[in-house]
Image (cartoon, rainbow, N blue to C red):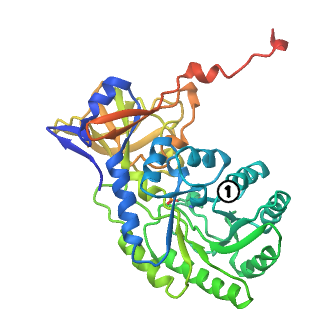
Amino acid sequence: MDNFDYRDGVLHAEDLPLSAIADAVGTPVYIYSRATLERHAQVFRDALAILPRVHIAFAIKANPNLAVLRVMSREGLGADVVSGGELARALAAGMPPQDIVFSGVGKQQHEMIQGLEAGIGQFNLESEEEGIELAALAAERGLTAACALRVNPDVDARTHAKISTGKAENKFGVPIDRGADIYARLAALPGLAMRGVAVHIGSQLSELGPFEEAFAKVGALIAEIRASGHAVTHADLGGGLGVPYKAGEVYPSPQEYAEMVARATAGWDVTLMFEPGRVICGNAGVLLTRVIRVKRSSNKAPFVVVDAAMNDLARPAMYGAWHDFDAVQPTGEKMTAHIVGPICETGDTFAMDRETDALQAGDLAVFRTAGAYGATMASSYNSRGFVAEVMVDGENWAVVADRILPAAISAAERVPDFLD
Ligand SMILES: *Cc1c(COP(=O)(O)O)cnc(C)c1O
């Protein structure tokens, strides 16, 4: 469910026609609905209320815009961060340090220090080596870092290979069968307070089975760690719940997810932590674009060339991902077209042979479900700028990220003297 609907034949974000935003800030532009963001945070939180002790940390990498983070923080969500930059954003958005979890396989020492000095709630350690480094940094400062050990359960998440993280060959976590030994060794280090285990098997999961399989393995590990005399008070079950990208697709609901978690974790007696990203913000955003021209092709269907490209929305080029594509003011006519951006790569293709609203040069259209892994994955390839981001709140709206023009990017470059 989202707040992007047609009224009087024009696609609106909440109470605002998207054409008004295009007139004011140009295209392409990402548009987020505050109401949808809030609703998704609330639905997820309410679903998990059947569990005894819960902490929800929004996975910032899905959408790190400060206004989006502010909505999350007002909803009482903490943050899952994977870099010093994301940590700074979480703090800037007003998230309490103790509600912040630091994940990631390559935390650098300066980032660990940043986390220690901020007093974040938990580090999710991805290796014994990382734990040893963090212990030394914490002990030097007379601090103790609360930690969970991320384990790799060797479970097939049955999602796209590039966003699958819980198979033995993936870089994430420690092998689950060595988890208890590594936990015990880390628990002995001054500077660390080992308190839990963490798991995250991938993103855009369409079934609950792989989660349940992974959580069963984590439950067995918790029992093993406790049997060896160590405390486990927290279990971080990660994120990964998928969202429908095609109208009509049905995904497991937060309620079904919560019921599965309740079943899988019965008797654990821990605080359960969650790191949802996409499920909160995916359907809360669209990428608004304008048709540059319609180009006839020898390939039967014409090319609809839009002003958004793979540098603005990378998911189709990167994962072969589908985004629904709809006209802002549909005429009722349909066409079959290839939807492409202006970038000089064949990969800059959003859709081939797509049945879509009839469009012509100058028309506005949206890629839906662009609120997660959209703007944040942008690049300036082909010397294109960074797209603006807007948040809508009823009839109100605000630019929440300025468009960054190509000139601002090249202004950071220098031609050295030796080339004079
Ligand atoms: C990416 C990521 C998430 C969020 O994944 P979603 O599929 O967006 O819910 C959560 N935890 C970790 C460790 C991640 O890397």
Asked if one can make out residue 252 in the rendered structure from this viewpoint, the answer is no
Image quadrant in which you'd find residue 128: bottom right
Whether residue 279 sits left or right of residue 273 in the image: it is left
Location of residue 135 in the rendering, given as x and y in whole percent from the top left corner = 81, 64
Quadrant placement of the C terminus:
top right
Which residue is found at the position 64% from the left and 74% from the top?
Answer: 197
Location of residue 153 in the rendering, given as x and y in whole percent from the top left corner = 63, 75
Callout 1 secondary element? loop
Q: Residue furthest bottom?
A: 227
Q: Looking at this view, is 25 or 131 the one in front?
A: 131
Q: Looking at this view, is 39 or 384 the one in front?
A: 39
Location of residue 39 in the rendering, given as x and y in whole percent from the top left corner = 33, 56
- The amino acid beneath tag 1 is Gly
Whether residue 257 sits left or right of residue 233 in the image: it is left
Quadrant placement of the N terminus:
bottom left
Location of residue 120 in the rendering, given as x and y in whole percent from the top left corner = 65, 58
Which residue has dot 1 on it? 119
Q: Residues within 10 Å of mark 1 (few under 14, many from 20)?
A: some
Mark 1 sits near ligand 1, with its Cβ under 8 Å away: no
- Give the image quadrant in which the ligand numbered 1 is located: bottom right
Which residue is found at the position 49% from the left and 36% from the top?
Answer: 312
Q: Residue furthest front?
A: 142
Q: Residue furthest top?
A: 420
Q: Looking at this view, is 382 or 230 the one in front?
A: 230
